[in-house]
């Protein structure tokens, strides 16, 4: 499985052949049959995108959300004439647990909750909003919070190296008439 070297960037890696060395980036798209791609997270939002002949995997932490990793990935897939995308949004830190600073008001301005004078941010809700703004209509969400769900890995909760891996692989060629 190919996973990028994740550094909270807005860089999208496009693979049109089996890759060599891993590269720094926080999203991967491919049309290579049989190549599994993925991202690893512990509180950031893992997103899988599925198109007809292209798939993608996104690691979206707050820095990636702020710098447009979702929009850039969707745009790159649209350049490859991917029309209809389905997005799977997996668990991440949510506003029930993810306390942030006042600077988030100017960075995001939405998906923030003020509770007892403290700000909390919902990374998953922000990711869904950005997917919709990018034109993705079919979005499936597993709405769990990694911080308060004990069976999911959370760096904030446990300071652990455990990670959630979200991956996808194109098995066969897509045929509109036979839908392989």
Image: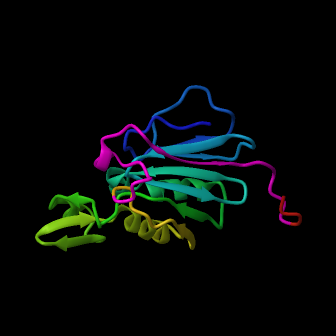
- State the residue at coordinates (57%, 73%): 137
- State the residue at coordinates (51%, 44%): 39
Q: Main secondary structure of the magenta part?
A: loop
User: Which quadrant does the C terminus fall into?
Assistant: bottom right
Q: 130 left or right of 138? A: left
Q: Which contiguous range is marked in magenta?
A: 148-176
Query: Residue 63: percent from the left, percent from the top?
Result: 32, 51
Query: Residue 141: percent from the left, percent from the top?
Result: 51, 67
Query: Residue 148: percent from the left, percent from the top?
Result: 34, 59
Q: 13 left or right of 148? A: right
Query: Residue 73: percent from the left, percent from the top?
Result: 51, 54
- Single out the residue that lies furthest toward the front: 150
Vertical placement of residue 17 versus 27, above or below: above
17 within the magenta span: no
Q: Nearer the viewer, residue 112 or 156?
A: 156
- State the residue at coordinates (35%, 58%): 93
Q: Quadrant of residue 34?
A: top right
């Amino acid at each position: 499985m190919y996973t990028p070297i994740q550094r909270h960037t807005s860089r999208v890696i496009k693979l049109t052949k089996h890759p060599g060395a891993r590269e720094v980036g926080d999203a991967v798209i491919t049309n290579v049959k049989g190549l599994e791609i993925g991202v690893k997270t512990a509180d950031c939002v893992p997103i899988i995108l599925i198109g007809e002949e292209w798939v993608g995997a996104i690691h979206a932490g707050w820095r990636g959300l702020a710098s447009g990793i979702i929009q850039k990935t969707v745009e790159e897939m649209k350049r490859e004439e991917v029309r209809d995308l389905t997005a799977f949004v997996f668990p991440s830190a949510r506003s029930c647990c993810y306390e942030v600073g006042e600077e988030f008001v100017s960075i995001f301005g939405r998906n923030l909750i003020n509770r007892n004078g403290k700000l909390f941010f919902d990374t998953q809700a922000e990711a869904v909003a950005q997917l919709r703004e990018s034109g993705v209509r079919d979005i499936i969400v597993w709405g769990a919070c990694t911080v308060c769900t004990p069976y999911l890995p959370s760096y904030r909760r446990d300071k652990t190296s455990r990670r959630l891996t979200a991956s996808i692989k194109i098995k066969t060629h897509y045929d509109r008439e036979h839908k392989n």
